[in-house]
Image: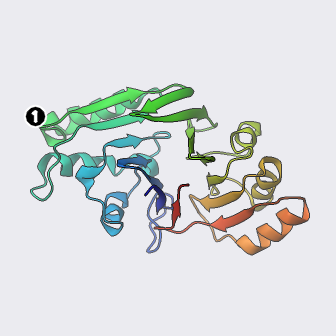
Amino acid sequence: MSTLTLLGTGTCQIEHERRASSVLLELDNTLILFDCGHGVVQRLLEVGVQHCQVQHVILSHFHPDHVSDLVPLLHASAWSRANPRTCDLHIYGPSGVKQLVEGLMQLFGPSSFQQPSYSVLVHEIAAGPFAIGEHSFESVSLPPAGNHGIRFTWGTKRYALTGDSSFHAQERAFLKNVDLAIIDSGHIEDTEIIELAVASQAKIIVCSHLYRQINAAQLQAQAVHRGYQGTILVGRDLMSFMLT
């Protein structure tokens, strides 16, 4: 079974119901985190995943609400007496990700985050295709935050995750005709979400990274009135989708 689960749909705001940005991809037996904001490591337990089972972390960019739980993830991997890590951890991100991880290692000491039984391997990825094992992804630059979204195909369907993003031509092209899109809705207005839906015709758009309340039914009605044929949803933590 392969799934996509929203672990965190929030932002830098501290809220009861939302943790910061993260999506968990379970692709066959491969577990991948896309972003790792505050509260996300605890959310893993709520979906039955131990921290040591996550083999890959993709960072869209380096804002704290997308990377801050790297610290407890790395620390638990090295020192937790319950479920210590035995497999390598791969971290992917745009230019600067090696500096980020090396800086944390220097600040806390390498033994705080890594043990001889496994390695922490850091991969800088530019815009374009990259692979995680047998799985193929595409990294796409989405201004303005030095942010990279990812797209991938699973079965017959296309999926897109934006990380942070503003409203621009790159995002409209990025979402074009995908089957499921998880989008940053915190930095764009309702009218821009509608425009993205109409322009991209993504079959399902899930609004995430939320700073405010969004009325999905209202957005849906306005988008359909302008020719949108898909569905707009408001994301919530632990919302899950089967990948088919």
> In which image quadrant can residue 62 be found?
top left
From what the image shows, is residue 194 above or below residue 157?
below
Where is mark 1, residue-wise? 116
Is 174 left, or right, of 195 in this rendering? left
Is 91 left, or right, of 53 in this rendering? right
Residue 78 in view: yes
From what the image shows, is residue 238 above or below residue 94?
below
Q: Nearest the camera: 154 or 10?
A: 154
Q: Position of residue 204 (x, y in %)?
A: 68, 59
Kindly identify the residue that appears in the image at 17 percent across and 38 percent down. Answer: 114
The amino acid type found where label 1 is placed reads Pro
Kindly identify the residue that appears in the image at 62 percent across and 57 percent down. Answer: 186
Quadrant occupied by the N terminus: bottom left
> In which image quadrant can residue 132 be found?
top left
Label 1 secondary element: loop
Q: Nearest the camera: 207 or 86?
A: 86
Q: Position of residue 26 (x, y in %)?
A: 41, 52
Is 3 left, or right, of 70 in this rendering? right
From what the image shows, is residue 42 above or below residue 27?
below
From what the image shows, is residue 87 above or below residue 192?
above
Crowding around mark 1 (Cα neighbors within 10 Å: few <14, some 14 to 19, many 20+) is: few
Residue 161 in view: no
